[in-house]
Image (cartoon, rainbow, N blue to C red):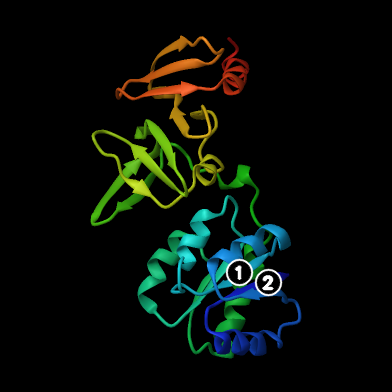
Amino acid sequence: MKAILVDDERLARMELRRLLAAHPEIEIVAETANAEEAEILIGSLEPDVLFLDVQMPGRSGFDLLASLDRAPHTIFVTAYDEYALRAFEFSAVDYLLKPVAPERLATALIRLKSAGPQAETAATRIPATQQIFVRDGERCWFVRLSDIALFESEGNYTRLYFAANRPLILRSLSYLEARLDPEIFFRTSRRHIVNLRLLDTITPSIDGGYDLKLVTGQQVEMSRRRAQEFREKMSI
């Protein structure tokens, strides 16, 4: 399995290399000290697993995973135990504390093997009936996916619209699109995904697309290209 080590401490990377030498099934194809380089390496090398630190200069390990449309399996390796819960929100295979014990690493690799190949998009869909945990600063919600009317891209972040709430989460729109039920959620443009069950009106626009209004009041434009996909999907 191809692996990339991401840790800003050179000695920590050296020690992890030493420990992984006892596991020839793991091939270290690259290492880096920051999330920016890691994102480029992941795109070009397509590793099976990341050994990822949390706290690094610039973007954190969580920031890195949130920016990826499809993340490799991830084993966190960090000196801090307080991030464990959040790590598993990112579907981490395991969470190792430094200094890493050889037997603890071996357990993590057993879990990695049992995780199998990276799941395809269709296998990672989240049912619309499922409640998800959303946090924005000090505010938190449990919200059913089917109650979210609109997802709006703001760079690597996405704003969610449900009831009177507008939280901003560190997930890209492409990441969310790959996990939402396509029978219920439809990407209308580069910036928006709408809940089809919460559409109020659909009006043709002069550019060949549609102007949409949601029952929650938001108005969204659907691009001409997406409008063609929409008609095919809805058989209209």
- 235 shown above or below 64: above
- 182 shown above or below 133: above
Counting residues from the start of the chain, the first of labels 2 and 1 encountered is 2
Q: Is residue 67 left or right of residue 228?
A: left
- 227 shown above or below 85: above
Q: Amino acid at mark 2?
A: Ala
Mark 2 closeness class: few <14, some 14–19, many ≥20 residues within 10 Å: many
Instruction: Name the residue: 40% across, 64% down.
Output: 86
Label 1 belongs to which residue? 50
Quarter residue 27 falls in = bottom right
The percent coordinates of residue 182 (x first, y second) are 55, 32
Numbered circle sitting on residue 3: 2
Instruction: Name the residue: 53% across, 87% down.
Output: 100
Instruction: Name the residue: 51% across, 65% down.
Output: 92
Numbered circle sitting on residue 6: none
Quarter residue 25 falls in = bottom right
The percent coordinates of residue 29 (x first, y second) are 73, 73
The percent coordinates of residue 222 (x first, y second) are 50, 22
Q: Kindly indicate whether the residue at mark 1 contacts the one at mark 2 (C-beta within 8 angstroms).
A: yes
- For the residues marked 2 and 1, what is the alpha-carbon distance in whole angstroms? 6 Å
Q: Secondary structure at mark 1?
A: strand
Q: Quadrant of the N terminus?
A: bottom right
- 233 shown above or below 86: above
Q: Amino acid at mark 1?
A: Leu
The number of callouts visible is 2
